[in-house]
Image (cartoon, rainbow, N blue to C red):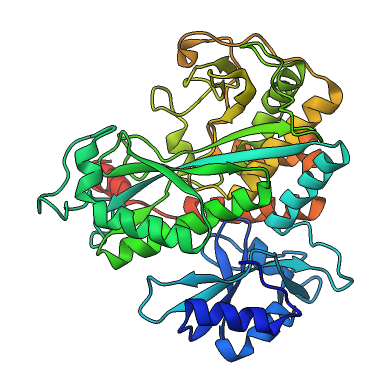
Amino acid sequence: MSLDAEDPSAFKAWLEQNGPIESIQAVVCDLNGIMRGKRVPVEQASKVLGGGIRMPLSIVGVDVWGEDIINSEQVFASGDRDGICAVTGRGALPVNWTSRPSALVPLWLLLEDGKPFLADPRQALAAIVREYEELGLRPVVATEMEFYLIDPEPDSAVPPISPYTGKRLDSDAILSIDELDDFGEFFSDVYKECARQNVPADAAIAENGIGQFEINLLHTDDPLKAADDAIFFKRIVKGVARKHGLAATFMAKPYGTRSGNGMHIHFSLLDADGNNVFNDGSDEGSAVLKNAVAGLLRGMPETTLLFAPHFNSYRRLRPDTHAPTAVCWGYENRTSAIRIPGGNPAARRIEHRVAGADANPYLVIAAILGAALVGIRNKWKPSAPVTGRAYTAEKLPKIPADWGQAVDAFEAGPIAAEIFDPTLRSMLIACKRQEIAGFAEQVTDYEFSAYLEIV
């Protein structure tokens, strides 16, 4: 239900349908895909819905630990100015898995003059969507979200205990119906909460890893909603897992020797008459599809930071791990970074397979749609599609396998600069370099055990 900020009666009616609600979580999404904001008494709903909430613009650029970025222009150099928090149009979302029912109201940041703050990741995606609208095109986007259920007690990832058998999971169970049945109550509650928040959850499957699952979210011709859905889905899964005595993680690689968690993005483009411009009636797809693929390939090295934004992300991008390592594309080829699925030509689409489930959906979709748009505008042509096992194709350029390299490529990349506002780029680069420094200062238990006495 979309709530009009000028119509308090609409929120009153919503409360009657979804109450009792004691508080409102007024939130914006930061560059790491983390919701940050304020808890507000429900009596102040009109303030939240009417743009009366303000937050520092710097809030979207804090590091993964929630720390301000040292020497950030958005903090001390500018006085750490506030932005206006406006409703996104998604409305209030009921949160029913906590001990005290509340509502989440998603917001995005505006400058004092009412213009979008383009370092807000949702605003960054909206800017790309507007560019498509100017060309008379409408992206259709769907996401596939992978996650692990784990035991909530240990400090590291440990497979969960089956609520049905009482035994700890100990083997991979790809496409296992029994494993889905074991966690049936959890999945029933996930689907129930998705329905309450208008998140279009589709098929669920057991994936390759122990306790790993995937749920697909149905396609929509509103990319902002697709990204919203992915963000809210992650919160739902984590919240419902806690309710069931479990934990859920979208970490890219929680187990070093098992499959990582990916976030695959499917997209096509519709013209003003609703025709799929990637479809030319053939199995290969149209020239526009190939232009888009070319843009994605050229932009991939410099946008990898958006697909793999964290230290752990690069553990996933390894050969023979069901994650891509080469900058390449192919038809019905899951070893390539860009896959063109088969099937009915009317549904011809591109599947982008690089992003981990730990990435920010707004920035991932903005990077994909943005690079594709650059390729379409320039009518670039892609390299030949790869056949067979892309991991062993030596001549293919490689996706950056190092976090620091990805930051450098994003900073220097002309396509990234064309897609994203300079403020977003500078904030993200500073954030990631601060995080890199933080990890570099830590000495792990594994290092201690390897070196402490023997060297």
| Relative image position of residue 76 (x, y in whole percent) | 75, 73
Tell me, yes or no, if residue 136 can be seen here. Answer: yes
Answer left or right for 392 relative to 296: left
Q: Quadrant of the N terminus?
A: bottom right
Answer left or right for 253 relative to 218: left
Q: Quadrant of the C terminus?
A: top left
**Residue at image point 42% right, 41% down:** 261
**Residue at image point 71% right, 21% down:** 289
User: How many marks on residues?
Assistant: 0
Answer left or right for 389 relative to 247: right
| Residue furthest left as drawn | 166
Tell me, yes or no, if residue 308 can be seen here. Answer: no
Instruction: Examine the image and state in which quarter residue 350 appears.
Output: top right
Q: Is residue 435 above or below residue 18?
A: above
| Relative image position of residue 419 (x, y in whole percent) | 78, 41
Instruction: Examine the image and state in which quarter residue 219 appears.
Output: top right
* Nearer-the-camera pick, 161 or 401: 161
| Relative image position of residue 158 (x, y in whole percent) | 23, 50
**Residue at image point 59% right, 80% down:** 13
| Relative image position of residue 133 (x, y in whole percent) | 83, 42
Q: Is residue 422 above or below residue 82?
A: above
Q: Is residue 48 above or below residue 108?
A: below
| Residue furthest bottom as drawn | 43
* Nearer-the-camera pick, 243 or 116: 243
